[in-house]
Amino acid sequence: QKEVEQNSGPLSVPEGAIASLNCTYSDRGSQSFFWYRQYSGKSPELIMFIYSNGDKEDGRFTAQLNKASQYVSLLIRDSQPSDSATYLCAVKVPGYSTLTFGKGTMLLVSP
Amino acid sequence: GAVVSQHPSWVICKSGTSVKIECRSLDFQATTMFWYRQFPKQSLMLMATSNEGSKATYEQGVEKDKFLINHASLTLSTLTVTSAHPEDSSFYICSATRAGANTGELFFGEGSRLTVL
């Protein structure tokens, strides 16, 4: 059973704060991990991906992967109201042709 | 980056009619495309996997005779909602993986919002 779990939120943070979004997955063989952002009424857009344990930084975004704990997170520094969206965690599980998505966490950044 | 284009973005149709949605990969070849459906405030639901030149693979509970998928070329897949009813009103999103890539990264189209009256 392949599962990707996310807290549905909403996660509310003030502007300028760090937003921390978390995701756990069930299949230990999972190979690659993706974070997508989806604005209301729009399709998902890729923020970043990570394959190896540790941190990966891209601008204000940092993805963190811990395969031993089956845990991946996304940190957003200096959060902006424009970051308010639903963040989808997705995992590539071996043997499956597409990504397995979590249900998403809604982030609300207040001015 | 890889661009996936969907058309139309919005469609309103009468109950009982059929609607075709196109999904094109503009700058890459996509051997596999995926069709998702998303109801308001709900998560993405995979409907089917579309492979170029072969029959689509449908997820459990998705009627293949109602949601016809054709993937005739490496850059085009179409979803036809046949005899649409109000309960088919939803946001339909296609996505594609780049041919030859094994990263699993999905490139999404803009989505097509279907409203059946």
Image (tube, coloured by chain):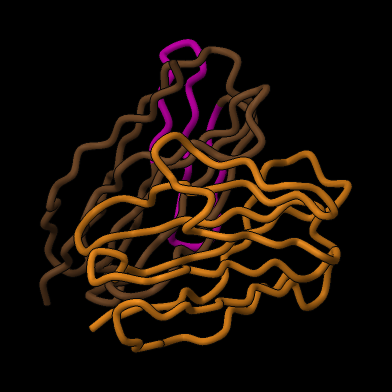
| Residue B82 place in picture, x, y as percent | 47, 68
Is residue A86 in the magenta section? no
Is residue B60 toward the left or the right of residue B29 in the image? left
Is residue A58 in the magenta section? yes
| Residue B99 place in picture, x, y as percent | 85, 52
| Residue B111 place in picture, x, y as percent | 47, 74
Residue B40 figure quarter:
bottom left
Q: Residue furthest right?
A: B100
Q: Nearer the viewer, residue A110 or A45?
A: A45
Q: Colour of chain A?
A: brown
Q: Colour of chain B?
A: orange
Is residue B111 toward the left or the right of residue B75 in the image? left
Residue B68 figure quarter:
bottom right
Q: Which residues are magenta?
A: A54-73
- Residue B1 visible in the displayed image: no
- Residue B49 visible in the displayed image: yes
Q: Is residue A19 above or below residue A23?
A: below
Q: Main secondary structure of the magenta part?
A: strand
Q: Is residue A96 above or below residue A50?
A: above
- Identify which residue is drawn at 49% across, 38% down: B59
Q: Nearer the viewer, residue B97 or A79?
A: B97
Q: State the count of labels.
A: 0
| Residue A8 place in picture, x, y as percent | 18, 44
